Image: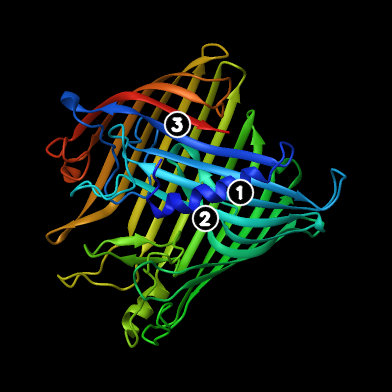
């Protein structure tokens, strides 16, 4: 077989070396995958429904791509005893494709399709287990202590990328984790963003659960990361998170309070709408402020995002499980005006939904996901800011194991969505561009291992 794509040329020898040097007892293979088939009105391609200006969407029966992650972990023990110090080497590749036909190539397809299959290196890091007692040092490129809201597929804490740090430093009342990550923008000579990450986790509150405190301080320098030229204003920002988790109803309830300012606050996009940067890692170059542009620098310092998120996953015996989610955020971009001379207003966003699953037996069940998304000041039309709202409901019979988290799942799904008149043309386009409601149906698999 001929291999011509650079990503595959790199990946396959790495995988071969990884697997070839591993014994059965020191090699792990993990992964995630989703894929399926779907159609919209009249047999057209499946479309997905997202409210304009929203940070996330409710995902069940509302994912239009094939996505996979393949993770390989090699353990190198420094002794024969099972408790001996060891190094764990992690390698994770990801791929995403449009799920449109049989052969989806990494080659660039004719316009407007573009590249059909994208390969990505997501993790390549080493951590030491037992080499510093309970403390775990690590370095490389990795997902770093991410917090996900599953039914939204949304990571509200996600300081990932190239970095180094130490985890699990015992303090008696909890654990301390220290890390530094560094993300450089692609294709533009803007500053690199360095994030210093300090976390206190596993703070026991007795019967009231446990607490985690997260502080991430980000900086972007005055030099372009490629040329070294001094053409940017130095900027900084702070993200603070307080995470409370308690085991309840056979599952857990997790409430997260967050505030981001500066680099983690907000900006305005080309359409004069506030956009939160609380999740920014700097890889998109959005932290660049031209040297001498004191007004933009001041506005960035004044910007902020406030967010509260709750995720409740419960198990009511063998027959019923459920996930509940609420996310509310408010973003102010500082004192910024649009072309009409009016101050750009805050953007407020609410996502509220549930996914109950009725388990018919140990291998079959039915899931129902219902969610609403409301975004205030989502977009500008003329001189007026408009709100967007979307309601989505999905019915999905499924074959799987028992419990909410059982995977793999084989699903049939039927999804119905409605949205407000102001969002017409921005949801379900082009198939439903002239409508305020839409429908899709199909089948999907989701698996992790």
Mark 2 — residue?
158
Q: Residues within 10 Å of mark 3 (few under 14, many from 20)?
A: many
Q: What residue appears at the point 53 percent right and 42 percent down from the top-left corner? A: 70
Against 393, residue 246 (above or below) is below
Q: Which residue is mark 1?
A: 17
* Residue drawn at point x = 35 percent, y = 78 percent: 289
Gap in angstroms between the C-alphas marked 2 and 3 = 23 Å
Residue 416 vertical position relative to residue 399 in the rendered view, above or below: below
The residue that mark 3 highlights is 354
Q: Position of residue 407 (x, y in %)?
A: 54, 27
Circle 2 packing at 10 Å, graded few (<14), some (14-19), many (20+), is some
How many numbered discs, if any? Answer: 3
- Earlier residue among tags 1 and 3: 1
Q: Are discs 1 and 3 less than 8 Å apart at CB?
A: no
The x, y position of residue 433, in whole percent, is 15, 39
Few, some or many residues within 10 Å of mark 1 (<14, 14–19, 20+): few
Q: Looking at the picture, how far across and down is residue 252, in whole percent? A: 62, 36
Q: Foreground: 37 or 150?
A: 37
SS class of the residue under badge 3? Answer: strand
In this rendering, would 111 be left or right of 444?
Answer: left
| Residue at the spot 58% in from the left edge and 20% down from the top edge | 402
Q: State the separation of the CA atoms marked 1 and 3.
A: 44 Å
Res. 157 in view? no
Q: Quadrant of the C terminus?
A: top right
Q: Secondary structure at mark 1?
A: helix
Which type of secondary structure does the marked residue at label 2 adopt?
loop
């Amino acid at each position: 077989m001929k291999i011509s794509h650079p990503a595959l040329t790199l990946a396959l020898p790495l995988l071969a070396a990884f697997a070839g040097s591993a014994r059965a007892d020191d090699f792990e293979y993990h992964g995630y995958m989703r894929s399926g088939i779907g159609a919209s009105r009249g047999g057209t391609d499946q479309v997905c429904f997202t409210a304009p200006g929203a940070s996330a969407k409710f995902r069940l029966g509302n994912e239009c791509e094939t996505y996979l992650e393949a993770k390989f972990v090699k353990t190198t023990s420094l002794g024969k005893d099972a408790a001996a110090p060891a190094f764990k080497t992690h390698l994770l590749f990801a791929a995403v494709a449009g799920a449109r036909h049989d052969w989806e190539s990494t080659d660039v397809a004719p316009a407007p399709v573009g590249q059909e299959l994208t390969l990505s290196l997501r993790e390549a890091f080493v951590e030491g287990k037992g080499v510093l007692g309970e403390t775990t040092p690590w370095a490389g490129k990795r997902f770093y202590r991410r917090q996900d809201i599953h039914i939204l597929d949304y990571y509200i804490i996600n300081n990932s990328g190239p970095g180094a740090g130490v985890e699990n430093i015992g303090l008696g009342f909890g654990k301390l984790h220290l890390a530094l990550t560094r993300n450089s923008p692609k294709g533009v000579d803007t500053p690199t963003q360095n994030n210093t990450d300090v976390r206190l986790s596993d703070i026991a509150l007795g019967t009231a659960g446990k607490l985690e405190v997260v502080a991430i301080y980000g900086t972007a320098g005055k030099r372009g990361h490629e040329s070294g030229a001094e053409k940017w204003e130095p900027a900084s920002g702070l993200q603070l998170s307080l995470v409370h988790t308690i085991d309840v109803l056979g599952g857990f309830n997790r409430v997260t309070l967050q505030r981001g300012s500066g680099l983690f606050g907000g900006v305005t996009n080309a359409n004069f709408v506030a956009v939160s940067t609380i999740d920014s890692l700097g890889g998109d170059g959005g932290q660049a402020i031209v040297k001498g542009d004191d007004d933009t620098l001041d506005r960035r310092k004044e910007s902020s995002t406030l967010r509260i998120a709750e995720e409740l996953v419960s198990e009511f015996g063998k027959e019923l499980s459920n996930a509940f989610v609420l996310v509310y955020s408010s973003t102010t971009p500082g004192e910024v005006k649009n072309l009409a001379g009016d101050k750009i207003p805050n953007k407020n966003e609410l996502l509220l939904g549930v996914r109950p699953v009725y388990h018919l037996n140990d291998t079959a069940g039915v899931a129902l996901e219902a969610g609403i998304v409301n975004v205030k000041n989502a977009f500008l039309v003329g001189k007026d800011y408009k709100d967007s709202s979307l309601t989505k409901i999905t019915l999905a019979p499924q074959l799987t194991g028992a419990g909410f988290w059982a995977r793999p799942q084989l699903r049939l799904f039927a999804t119905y969505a409605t949205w407000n008149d102001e969002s017409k043309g921005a949801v379900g386009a082009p198939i439903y561009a002239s409508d305020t409601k839409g429908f899709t149906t199909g089948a999907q698999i989701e698996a992790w291992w």
